[in-house]
Amino acid sequence: MEFLRSVVPFHPMPVLATDRVILRAPAMSDFAAWSSLREQSRSFLTPWEPLWPVDDLTRGAFRRRMRRYHSEMRANTGYPFLVFTTDGMQLVGGLTLSHVVRGVTQSCSLGYWMGAPYAGKGLMTAAVRTVIPFVFDTLRLHRLEAACLPHNAASIRLLEKAGFTREGYARRYLCIEGRWQDHLLYAIVSDDPRP
């Protein structure tokens, strides 16, 4: 296994930009904006996320998050991004590529969150569309997967607008809001048409 790890190239975190959004790796200097937006959006986000630890919005928890992100980036198993507007560099949300698997699978999972004040403006759709070329052209993966709760109409709409195809239904797939919940499974593969 060590041999396989050594032949996978390290991909430094790029800055990905379009006319609407900029995606870049989080840094400790983002703590104040990140914690403020997450706190402001708590009631909006908690129905769609795992339970938040009691100390989730503290500087210490953010520092541990940064250490985990750096470890995943070094191991080429995860790539975190914060999403900013191009006009004013306002933090609006986050997007993570996780569970990167090489070998015969060549896939990863997509997760994302949007701050409440910026929801419904197409910014996360723009961010997801922006990260797709990074997944397929830079990381050279074959498959990008995502899952969402069946009653999350906004997430379903986002994934379908970004070119994902609904592939299945997973019973009690992820522990969201403290309980195992069913999810719709979506994916886009490298040779799918891109919107």
Image (cartoon, helix red, strand yellow):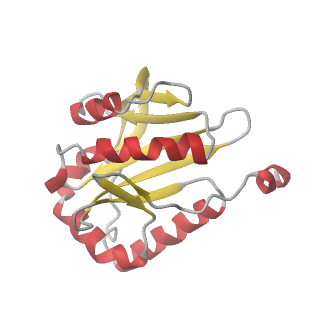
Q: Quick check: 150 left or right of 28?
A: left
Q: Provide residue 150's location: percent of width, then percent of height.
A: 29, 27
Q: Quadrant of residue 171?
A: top left
Identity of the residue furthest to the left in this view: 117
Using the image as rendered, state which of residue 22 and residue 52 is in the foreground. Answer: 22
Q: Quadrant of residue 83?
A: bottom left
Q: In which quarter of the image is residue 32?
A: bottom left
Identity of the residue furthest to the right in this view: 3
Can I make out residue 120 in this image? yes
Using the image as rendered, state which of residue 75 and residue 176 is in the foreground. Answer: 75
- Quarter of the picture containing the C terminus is top left
Please report the residue visible at 50 percent of the width from the left and 24 percent of the height from the top.
192
In the rendered picture of this protein, how many numbered marks are placed on residues? 0
Depicted 19 relative to depicted 65: above or below: above
Using the image as rendered, state which of residue 51 and residue 137 is in the foreground. Answer: 137
Q: Quick check: 52 left or right of 104?
A: left
Q: Quick check: 92 left or right of 187?
A: left
Q: Provide residue 54's location: percent of width, then percent of height.
A: 31, 67
Q: Quick check: 91 left or right of 11?
A: left
Please report the residue visible at 38 percent of the width from the left and 43 percent of the height from the top.
128
Identity of the residue furthest to the front in this view: 19
Using the image as rendered, state which of residue 178 and residue 101 is in the foreground. Answer: 101
Q: Provide residue 107's location: percent of width, then percent of height.
A: 59, 38
Can I make out residue 177 in this image? no
Please report the residue visible at 45 percent of the width from the left and 46 percent of the height from the top.
131
Q: Provide residue 39's location: percent of width, then percent of height.
A: 21, 65
Please report the residue visible at 28 percent of the width from the left and 36 percent of the height from the top.
155
